[in-house]
Image (spheres, grey):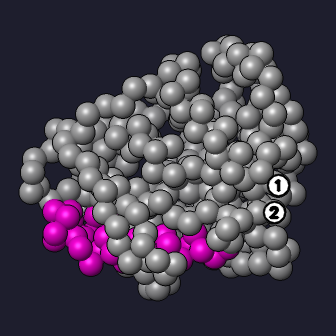
Amino acid sequence: MSSLDPEVEHMLELAKQADRPPLEALTPAEARDAYAASWDVLQPPRTEVGSVRNEAISGPGGPLQLRIYRGAATQSGERLPCLLYLHGGGWVIGNLESHDRLCRQLANLAGICVVAVDYRLAPEHRYPAAVDDAVAALHWVERNAAALSIAPDRIAVGGDSAGGNLAAVLALMARDGSVPPVSYQALLYPALDLAADSESYRKVTAGVSLTAATMRYFIDHYTPSLLLRKDWRASPLQAASLAGTAAALVLTVAHDPLCDEGRAYAARLEAEGVRVTALHLSDHMHGMLLTGKLVRASNTILSFVAAAIGLALHSPTPARP
């Protein structure tokens, strides 16, 4: 495996000196607190956006919280493309605050509306609760496009890690007509196969923030049933066909147990006729987009991700399958 970016190595050395236990040694509640303690350390300051507001909608498990951002350079009332964003965190940790800075940057850099979803977390709410909440949020965005001043034919889905899993599921469901159409999918080091049996799981076992053991801890909380892990709504890589899904951006990083499944998904999309931009970073680790305060490459790659989303959604003809 290749060497890490020197700034990533420095960040990992600081974490080692802090001598904090790995997430899999903690309860879910403790893991959430530990994750929250890292945000100010790793992420750059919040950027101002054109507008931001919280919205509570009716979800399948009760009120579902959304946060709606409009890019700083956009005009009030302008019909913007929209990205429905699902945060990462192994379906166990993370919330609207963990990815607030990332969503602000995406809205500003892509010149779009971003709708972030505070879906229910495991183990309190196991699979398919997160999927059901993502579905409800997409339906709500499509129904309320006029009120949100967004273009209903330019709605994309995206997310990192567990959120990338949910975004891929929505793109498949949109192809099948069970949710509104989506015009693009941005899958950022996504979790796509809960079998957790790839070569990258065997390689990435120590020395980084997300190891194979950490990922299995998350999967065990989200889908304790081995049978359900084979459902394509839990493991999109298990879907019989990816053909006809929305054009995609797939970001993978080498120092990540999820690397192989992300690369396999991108290869399948390409082989099955889906337009895909596949970006692989051999010198970075999982979660790199949330480390911009310490790792300069994080900001460069985030700019690329936002540019790819903006280009797809602002093109004269929306990116369709």
Kindly report the secondary structure that dominates the magenta region of the rendered protein: helix
Could you tell me which residue is drawn at 46 percent across and 45 percent down? 97
Q: Residue at x 60, y 33 (%)?
A: 37
Q: Residues within 10 Å of mark 1 (few under 14, many from 20)?
A: some
Relative to residue 110, is residue 282 drawn left or right? Answer: right
Image vertical order of residue 300 relative to residue 257, above or below: above
Question: Residue 145 in magenta?
Answer: yes
Q: What is the spatial separation of the Cα atoms under label 1 and label 2, in whole angstroms?
A: 6 Å
Per the image, label 2 sits on a secondary structure element best described as helix
How many numbered discs, if any?
A: 2
In this rendering, is residue 231 above or below 78? below
Residue at 34% across, 67% down: 56
The reply, left or right, for residue 89 in relation to residue 145 is: right
Residue with the mark numbered 2: 220
Residue named by callout 1: 216
Q: Residues within 10 Å of mark 2 (few under 14, many from 20)?
A: some
Q: Would residue 111 be found to the left or right of residue 15 on screen?
A: left
Q: Magenta segment range?
A: 127-156
Q: Is residue 114 at least partly visible in the picture?
A: yes
Give, as a three-letter code, the residue at label 1: Arg
| Residue 190 placement (x, y as % from top left) | 63, 53
Tag 1–tag 2 contact (CB < 8 Å): yes
Q: Nearer the viewer, residue 317 or 29?
A: 29
What's the residue type where badge 2 is placed? Asp
Which x, y percent locates residue 211? 80, 41
Question: Residue at left 64%, top 46%?
Answer: 32
Furthest residue in direction right, as rendered: 202
Q: Residue 265, how many percent across, how many down?
A: 66, 59
The answer to whether residue 173 is seen in the rendering is no
| Circle 1 SS class | helix
Q: Quadrant of the N terminus?
A: top right
